[in-house]
Image: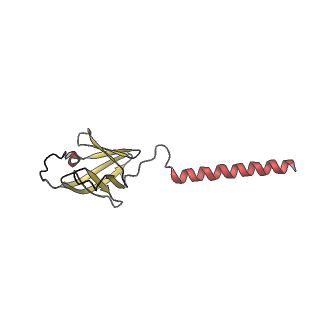
Amino acid sequence: MARMLRFSALTGALLVAATLAIAGCATNAGPGAAPDPIGTWGDPSESTEPSIVLAADGTLTGTDGCNRLTGAWSMDDTTVTFEHVATTRMFCEGVDTWLSELAAATIADETMTVLDESGAEIGTLPRTE
């Protein structure tokens, strides 16, 4: 009887461990996994603040806080590359239009670090959706 109880306890512990491992895999991409760039970065409801939306089909839309942006994006390992980005060229007094210089980005946690053509950091955007 004691042997049967130990076997049942061991089996139960293994089932719990397996369930937790499977649940962890379902919710965590794991170390070294590429971040998911799809979504909204920045707050699009703030008309004078920069924001971009990266769609699953590889297109992007957004604003630098003054001008509208449209283009395409792709991901290679952990770097997002922005391609064929077109922007309007309106003058908006007092608005920092740094996002219009985007060329690439990296993502860590819920923050996108935007880089210019030379690879220099020009700003960050938080994930909002």
Say which of 85 and 19 sits in front: 19
Q: Position of residue 108 (x, y in %)?
A: 39, 43
Q: Which is more toward the observer, 8 or 82?
A: 8
Residue that lies at the very extreme toward the right in this rendered image: 1
Answer with left or right where residue 29 lies relative to residue 88: right
Expressed as whole percent of the image width and height from the top left, the position of residue 27 reads 51, 52
Q: Nearer the viewer, residue 71 or 77?
A: 71
Total marks placed: 0
Q: Is residue 111 above or below residue 67?
A: above
Q: Taking 18 as reference, is 50 left or right?
A: left
Where in the figure is residue 111, as x and y percent of width and height? 36, 45
Indicate whether 104 appears above or below 59: above
Q: How is the rendered protein coloured?
A: secondary structure
**Quarter containing the C terminus:** bottom left
Residue drawn at the location 19% of the way across and 47% of the way down: 97
Measuring from the top left, give residue 35's x and y in whole percent.
41, 48
* Residue beneath the point at 76% across and 49% down: 9
Asked if residue 105 is positioned above or below residue 129 in the image, the reply reads: above
The image quarter in which residue 117 lies: top left
Residue beneath the point at 68% across and 52% down: 15
Point out the residue furthest to the bottom here.
Answer: 57
On the rendered structure, is 120 left or right of 26? Answer: left
Kindly identify the residue that appears in the image at 53 percent across and 54 percent down: 26
